[in-house]
Image (cartoon, grey):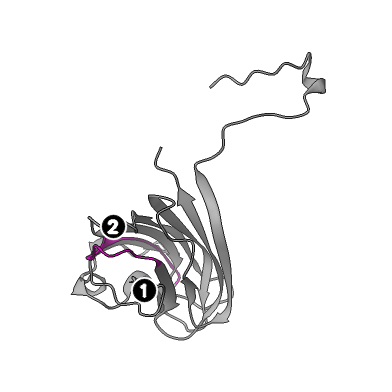
Amino acid sequence: MLVKHNNNSISNVTSVNLPQGKMTLISSQTASGSASISFTSGIDSTYPIYKFEFINMHPATDNATFEFNLSTDTGSNYNVTKTTTHIFSYHDEADTTTALGYSTSFDLAQSTGNQIITNGIGNGNDESASGSMYLFSPSSGTYVKHFIATTNTYYSNNWSIESFTAGYGNTTSTVDAVKFVMSSGNIDSGTIKLYGIKGD
């Protein structure tokens, strides 16, 4: 795209009309010994894609899993039926252990329980998990609600674990809230940002 200015020189330019980015920050929440982080507003028909960014999610309890669930009633209940997959790769600091595999214990088959995004997060001062999750067309009245999450975790045994979780909420009802929790204990610290992404 060509951006043209009527000013005579760069030194005289007072404003620049650049195209706006397609990703818009809707809200941001930072945990501080929080039992959960819930987004109960801002997820609607405005955008076809929503993105959550996880920044240094640090559990109070060692070896915790980071999980989420969906709601169709603005957070009164988080119990949407889900079918999912979970794969991972890891490598330890000592360069002695590596793996790539599918985790059957972390997938769901028509379950209303929480979906694990990543596991084994250490609670040492420098340990945490970061990544992102996409939620597609949560307001669709026709299709199920697909999601894809990717994270990297400082595992409690000094491993780097990359996790890939994907699936769908098996509902044609509007999904309008999402809750994130640790499997045990509070979310000691960490920030989750919610973005809306335009489809054009």
| Residue named by callout 2 | 146
Image x and y of residue 86, in percent: 27, 64
Q: Secondary structure at mark 1?
A: loop
Q: CA distance from mark 2 to mark 1?
A: 18 Å
Q: Residue at x 50, y 83 (%)?
A: 35
Q: Residue at x 73, y 30 (%)?
A: 15
**167 or 116, nearer to the observer:** 167
Counting labels gives: 2
User: Hey, what amino acid is under mark 2?
Assistant: His
Image x and y of residue 186, in percent: 50, 83
**Left or right, residue 109 beside residue 116:** left
Disc 2 or disc 1, which is closer to the eye? 1
Farthest right residue?
Answer: 11
Image x and y of residue 81, in percent: 23, 72
Q: Is residue 137 above or below residue 171?
A: above
**184 or 141, nearer to the observer:** 141
Q: Residue at x 35, y 80 (%)?
A: 77
Q: Residues within 10 Å of mark 2 (few under 14, many from 20)?
A: some
Which of the two labelled residues, at mark 2 and mark 1, occupies the earlier sequence position? 1
Image x and y of residue 141, in percent: 26, 58
Q: Residue at x 44, y 55 (%)?
A: 51
User: Hey, what amino acid is under mark 1?
Assistant: Asp
Q: Is residue 116 above or below residue 43?
A: below
**Left or right, residue 35 beside residue 70:** right
Q: Secondary structure at mark 2?
A: strand
Labelled disc at residue 73: 1
- Residue 93 inside the magenta-drawn segment: no
Labelled disc at residue 117: none
* Magenta region, residue range: 158-176
Q: Residues within 10 Å of mark 1 (few under 14, many from 20)?
A: some
